[in-house]
Image: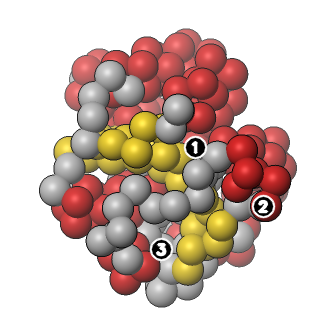
């Protein structure tokens, strides 16, 4: 059963998960967690430094932190863009109210143009790297999310999932008091750093 006392934000790096998450947590008077920030505090290292030991080791730490945060209620959590890569994370995300923040490759390139903190974008052409990452993750974001929010514009619109998915999972917002205007601000780059 879906836990509507937990909101997990998923999506590409630069989609606005951190900035949207903070604003949403404030509006609900809930606690905000950013998995990348929590990992940086726990290990006293930047995300880039954690990637030096290899992406698989980083993903293990990310999963451990997700499981820890998932034990809490009344939370909004910004996940790393790659949280959907590990299938062991899928069950947690499916049981929460999971929001996919979508942004086009053009928007992501513009937002991340001067951001050199993303280890998966540190080598080669950023647009090409983003396109490859997006193609690898897009279907997982869609499948795991309760709703999809387009963050390409400053005024964010709610885009509900497909009818077949709505039959499988609830498409309502967790509280009737949560209105579209409270999502404004999610189009920013945010403060995450993983990917």
The residue located at (37%, 77%) in the rendering is 179
- Label 3 environment density (alpha carbons within 10 Å; few <14, some 14–19, many ≥20): many
Q: Nearer the viewer, mark 3 or mark 2?
A: 2
181 in relation to 168, above or below: below
Sequence-wise, which precedes: disc 2 or disc 1? Answer: 1
The residue located at (23%, 60%) in the rendering is 28
**Which mark, by number, is residue 49?**
none
The residue located at (66%, 67%) in the rendering is 160
Q: Nearer the viewer, residue 154 or 173?
A: 173
Sequence-wise, which precedes: disc 3 or disc 1? Answer: 1
- For label 2, the residue is 162
| Callout 2–callout 1 Cβ contact below 8 Å | no
Left or right of 136 in this view: 55: left
| Residue 184 visible somewhere in the drawing | no
Cα–Cα span, label 3 and label 2: 23 Å
Q: Position of residue 81 (x, y in %)?
A: 57, 43
Residue 193, picture quadrant: top left
Q: Position of residue 19 (x, y in %)?
A: 35, 62
Q: Position of residue 163 (x, y in %)?
A: 79, 61
Q: Nearer the viewer, mark 2 or mark 1?
A: 2
Residue 69, picture quadrant: top left
The residue located at (32%, 22%) in the rendering is 71
- Label 1 environment density (alpha carbons within 10 Å; few <14, some 14–19, many ≥20): many
| Callout 3–callout 2 Cβ contact below 8 Å | no
Q: Position of residue 78 (x, y in %)?
A: 41, 46
**Which mark, by number, is residue 81?**
1
- For label 3, the residue is 187
The secondary element bearing badge 1 is classed as helix
Cα–Cα span, label 3 and label 1: 15 Å
Name the residue at the left extreme.
Answer: 29
């Amino acid at each position: 059963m879906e836990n509507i006392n937990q909101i997990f934000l998923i999506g590409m790096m630069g989609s606005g998960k951190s900035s949207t998450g903070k604003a949403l947590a404030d509006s609900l008077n809930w606690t905000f967690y950013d998995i990348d920030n929590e990992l940086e505090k726990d290990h006293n290292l930047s995300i880039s430094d954690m990637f030096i030991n290899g992406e698989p080791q980083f993903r293990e730490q990310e999963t451990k932190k997700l499981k820890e945060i998932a034990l809490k209620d009344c939370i909004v959590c910004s996940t790393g863009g790659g949280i959907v890569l590990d299938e062991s994370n899928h069950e947690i995300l499916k049981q929460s109210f999971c929001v996919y923040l979508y942004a086009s490759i053009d928007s992501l390139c513009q937002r991340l143009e001067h951001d050199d903190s993303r280890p998966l974008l540190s080598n080669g052409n950023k647009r090409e790297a983003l396109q490859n990452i997006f193609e690898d993750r897009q279907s997982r974001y869609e499948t795991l999310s309760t709703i999809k929010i387009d963050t390409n514009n400053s005024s964010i619109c709610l885009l509900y999932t497909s009818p077949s998915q709505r039959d499988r999972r609830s498409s309502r917002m967790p509280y009737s008091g949560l209105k579209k205007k409270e999502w404004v601000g999610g189009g920013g780059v945010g403060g995450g750093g993983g990917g």
